[in-house]
Image (spheres, rainbow, N blue to C red):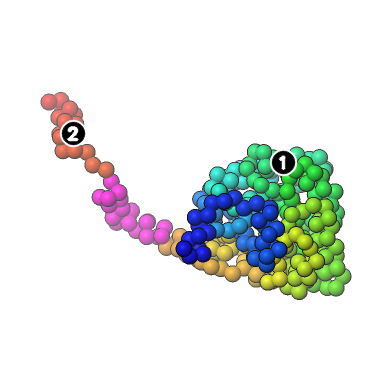
Amino acid sequence: MSAVSNLATTKKKITLKDLQNKKAQGHQIVALTAYDYSFAKSLDAGGVDLILVGDSLGMVVLGHETTLSVNMDEMLHHCKAVARGTQRAFLVGDMPFLSYQVDVHEAVRNAGRFLSEAGMNSVKLEGGFHMESTVRAIVRAGIPVMGHIGLMPQSVHQIGGYRIQGNTASKARSLLEDALALEEAGCFAIVLESVPTRVARLITERLSIPTIGIGAGVGCDGQVLVTYDLLGLFDSFTPKFVKKYANLRAVITEAVEQYICDVRDEKFPAQEHSSLISEDEWQLFLDDLNGS
Ligand code: KIV
């Protein structure tokens, strides 16, 4: 059996232990984002280890300029759909802006809703050492937490745009301290976004928990991308670190144009898309209409 078909048929649920073992064995953790049932099913069948229901939802699905407008109800709604489509991948629900920054108790309650209501296995939140007590409280409640440092999109206005982070000696030092603080607080993994490759590699080597890179080069324990970027479905803004594996926007547009032509030319629906009534029943129907 090929490696690919083996992945697609292995339905054993990925656990935190599996992710940790991958780091120990030097095997890359493969992660992607999903926001609905059908995409989750496809990613799961393809064999990704981890599915993140990211708050990138706000930009790529809901059409907002930033991730800041996404709320808990929207996140939970999409997480539920993804959970229904996933059997194998480990599921991470992204905590939206203001769902964990204001108050630790509120953060624990909101984090819990991702597991109890939406079928997620864990949550992700943005922030370094200043999030230590929040992470600690959520983990103490039995909820696995993934950290997210480097470029933190929920702080886009504070950092002045989507730009590389940790690219000076002192900023690299702070990033490492953030990562160590999150590990100490109990995170099971950390996303490193838009960080120079050498900095990400060093952080990865200093941590015992896995790092998942996005725009952080090859030195991490795994990679994540926004699926809409990878498939060429979102073109308002494409970060330099994205590799497009398909151009589905063009494929969809072409299919829609073809459908429009077929409907206008009455080529669709064809006979194979249509249903029949038997000749006898048809005659009875006509007779009935004509009152005979
Ligand atoms: O929201 C998201 O999709 C993310 C990934 C880019 C890591 O946080």
Residue 112 badge? 1
Question: Callout 1: helix, strand or loop?
Answer: helix
**Against 287, is 157 above or below?**
below
**Against 217, is 283 above or below?**
above
Relative depth, front residue between 135 and 87: 87
Q: How would you rate the neighbour count of disc 2 (Cα within 10 Å): few for under 14, some for 14-19, many for 20 or more?
A: few
* Any part of residue 223 in sight: no
Q: Which residue is mark 2?
A: 281
Side of 32 where 195 appears, left or right: right
Relative depth, front residue between 286 and 245: 245
**Residue at 72% from the left image edge and 61% from the top image edge:** 210
**What's the residue type where badge 2 is placed?**
Glu
Q: Position of residue 256 (x, y in %)?
A: 41, 58
Bounds of the magenta span? 255-274
**Residue at 16% from the left image edge and 38% from the top image edge:** 279
Between tags 1 and 2, which lies in front?
1
Q: Position of residue 1 (x, y in %)?
A: 46, 63
Q: Position of residue 241 (x, y in %)?
A: 65, 70
Residue 219 in magenta stretch: no
Side of 50 where 279 appears, left or right: left
Q: Dividing the image into 4 quarters, which one contains the C terminus?
A: top left
Q: Residue furthest right?
A: 170
Relative depth, front residue between 12 and 66: 12
Q: Main secondary structure of the magenta part?
A: helix
Question: Callout 2: helix, strand or loop?
Answer: helix
Q: Mark 1 to mark 2: distance in Å?
A: 58 Å
Residue 261 in magenta stretch: yes
**Against 6, is 120 above or below?**
above
| N-term-proximal mark, 1 vs 2 | 1
Q: How would you rate the neighbour count of disc 1 (Cα within 10 Å): few for under 14, some for 14-19, many for 20 or more?
A: many
